[in-house]
Image (spheres, grey):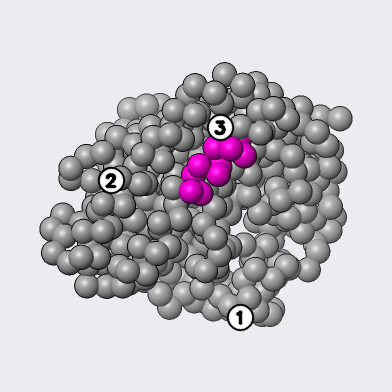
Amino acid sequence: MKIPTLITLLSLIMSINICHAKPSTPNVSDQSPRVADSGFAALALHDCQTDLRYLNQVFGWQVAWPSQWASIVSAGAANDTNTALTRWREAPAAIDSAIEILRRGIDHHETAPRPVVLRVYQQVSDLTAILAQDSSPYLFPAPNTEAARQWNTMIREAITPAVRRFEGFLQNEYLPAARMAPGLSGIANGEACFAQTVTWWTTLNSSTEDIETTGRHLLDEARSALVTSDSQGADFSDIMERLRAFQAHNSTTPKELIALSAAAIKRADAATLSRFAHKSGSPIGVVEMPAYVQDSFPVGRYVTAQGNEPATYSINSSRPQERRLMAEVIAFHEAIPGHHLFAPIPGRSQRAPTITLGSLKAGRFTPNISPMRWVCIPARSTVKA
């Protein structure tokens, strides 16, 4: 049986707005032992025999940890740096543990797909270079307290060498052994793992055939809607050619892309209560994604509030001309009415009631916020959970 890739599954989830409350950062207590894994993405793969539990270019530790280091530094040495020191001293051991786990994955033929490994390797390699800089954003520029000096020493003498070891391991041992097959195909019990992942992300028990059929139906529906809405009465192929031409020849700059996204989020926030039961009361910033992850990262990422730092929508500003067409759509998904709207809601990790695929096929659905859970209701309904 054909197993769709995880990318196909995630694309389908975003297309049909399946409503399932999931935190956008790893669901791990601050007091839990630090683990260098795929973070949030690892949760859906907990029973699967795949190294995708430890390698992920979107939610992996090499993406999540640096933003936390930068937040600690930006908060200043006057904050509780000693607590941060205690927690982050675990990082080198966590990275070395991940190396050993991945080494066993090679022996047991559980390696991640090569495209994923290449992206993670690029991120780790770039991170190593940034950590080694004297002006690294993860170092206190003027360490005028003992805690700040200890932090800088830890980054330079413990964390940086550990990240460099991980980089060397990926390059010399793991990449040559990485699987060429995509997604979960080719691993032991791959079909069962895929089914588990579908259920975890969507609460649905859908077959691969159902997913493919629904996806094709949604694509056909989107094409039809595009043709119907075109003011020039063009057919689908002509519309696509026009959009491709705009994508190739517009002169959007990174700053304009960021400003466009920020304006879209502001409009969405103002309109939230017209479609949802609750509105986010916390601020969200719009920032440019760190350069070291842009080449290997999707178009955007939501980062929850950390300490005194507000939540942010981090935009991949590379190739802004290409990203102009979808900039507003992605801003809505990553910020409002997407992740930023449900992230602060208590009980967000509770599982939503199961929704049948038949009900999804019957019409469009939109998420409605309640203090306890996500629920799915038909679009334009006035029902509130």
Q: Earlier in the sequence, mark 3 or mark 1?
A: 3
Contact, CB < 8 Å: mark 2 with mark 3? no
Q: Residue at x 54, y 30 (%)?
A: 117
* Residue beneath disc 1: 371
Give above or below for 13 relative to 264.
Answer: above
Q: Nearer the viewer, mark 2 or mark 3?
A: 2
Identify the residue at the far top of this view.
176
Q: Earlier in the sequence, mark 2 or mark 3?
A: 3
Q: Is residue 35 magenta?
A: no
Calculate the distance from the C-alpha at mark 3 to the C-alpha at mark 1. 36 Å
Indicate the secondary structure of the residue bearing disc 3: helix
Question: As rendered, which of 361 and 107 lies closer to the eye?
Answer: 107
Which residues are drawn in magenta? 93-102
* Residue beneath disc 2: 156
Residue 182 located left or right of residue 135: right
* Residue beneath disc 3: 116
The image quadrant where one finds the N terminus is: top right
Residue 50 located left or right of residue 86: right
Q: Nearer the viewer, mark 3 or mark 1?
A: 3
